[in-house]
Amino acid sequence: MTVSESQLKKMLGKYKYRDLTVQETVSVIAQYKDLKPVMDGYVFNDGSSRELMSLTGTVPVSYRGNTYNIPICLWLLDTYPFNPPICFVKPTSTMTIKTGKHVDANGKIYLPYLHEWKHPQSDLIGLIQVMIVVFGEEPPVFSRPTISAAYPPYQATGPPNNPYMPGMPSGMSPFPPGPAPNPSGYPNYPYPPPSGQFPATTSTPHYPTQPPVTTVADGRRKQKQVWICGHSYVFWAEKRALERSFGTQLGIRMDDAKLHWLGKSGMTWDQLIPTLLHTRRRLSDPDVLVVHLGGNDLGTDRNVDIVNQMKKDLGHLKQIFKNSILVWSNMVPRKVWNQDVPHRVMEKYRKRINREIGYFMEYIGGTVIRHDSLVPESPGLFHLDGVLLSESGTDIFNLDLLSVLETLV
């Protein structure tokens, strides 16, 4: 049964920031329909108990070409969103926890996103997207090798690593068999230091601050594939690059990388994934994927809905193109916005989305192109229509692309 906003407000009557919590909860259960809000008692380490709401259910995780429903439980403190959720993987009777860098033997989840939680940059949608990406690389549960007795329910007593968690919906698909779980775990929140003993892994770190830079030329390395996808700014950037001496490669050697421009005037966010999937039919997957999009969507929907959809789609792209570095190109300010919204409000929307998506990109291992020099106050950088960039502005746009791309290829 769907929980209404008014029901949520009643459930969260004692929460200090009820309306903010309700707003986020509504967004989450609209996108992840298997997550349900449940009120129950949570027992803390000192033995005290508090009535809290949890979001309990499953999230879809892509692993080795298949999608599995991973059971989770997110407890929201009554000080949410100014304190992070307490998060657990909650295995069914057919599953067993696989401990690792992000999950301990009790199922408690550890992520830098939680450890560095800061409202409003951090939110539930971003958290879930990070979980989906991380669990797609290092699954937190596996199916039990043999049928065993029903998994004992959690009791509302004991330390915080063993809270009571409401029962999960039945009928979830089991996770694929895997190696026996590592019995080692982490003692307590906060996020354990890097010096801790983690299981050996062949995967790359989940949250690099900057992709590795090649410092030594190697003629044997393969040519990197770079896709640059976006609306009219990308379309005209390619045209302008063709007129300049550096060409559409932006001066990058063909031996190092091949740039593919996927620009379309008037392109909106909902065209991003279809465009990339269509391109995938004729090109090999990108090593670097640059996305410059969203400016045409501002003012067409609620700002929070636009941000949530962007995070959801970028997280999905991280799963589709597992070996690609995702690059977010900040939305550039405009002198004129075509939407029927005051200019100052549009600029406020633009800055907030750039900030939130930039923060999200950091946690999925991506990077950001900022375009700090492209401001309307600088003379000669914008077209007379106030929307597009001038030739000089487009040159700066391309130089911003180059400054980041040359560190990635």
Image (tube, rainbow, N blue to C red):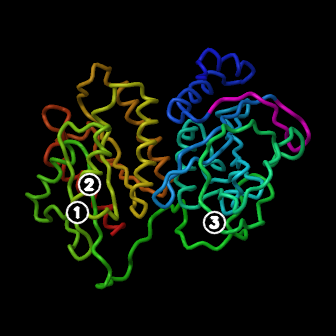
Which residue is the site of mark 2?
Answer: 228
Q: Residue 81 vs residue 327: left or right?
A: right
Q: Based on the picture, tell me whether residue 291 belongs to the magenta stretch.
A: no
When the figure is inspected, residue 45 is found, relative to residue 33, above or below; the finding is: below
Q: CA distance from mark 2 to mark 1?
A: 7 Å
> Could you say which is closer to the camera, residue 172 or residue 245?
172
Numbered badge on residue 178: 3
Q: Are marks 2 and 1 in contact (CB under 8 Å)?
A: yes
- Residue placed at 23% from the left, 69% from the top? 252
Is residue 37 in the magenta section? yes
Which amino acid is tagged 1? Leu
The amino acid type of the residue labelled 2 equals Ile
Relative vertical location of residue 237 with respect to residue 84 in this rendering, above or below: below
Task: List the residue tagged with mark 1.
Answer: 259
Report the amino acid beneath label 3: Gly
Name the image quarter holding the N terminus: top right
Task: Report how far apart the C-alphas of labels 3 and 1 lie in the structure.
Answer: 39 Å
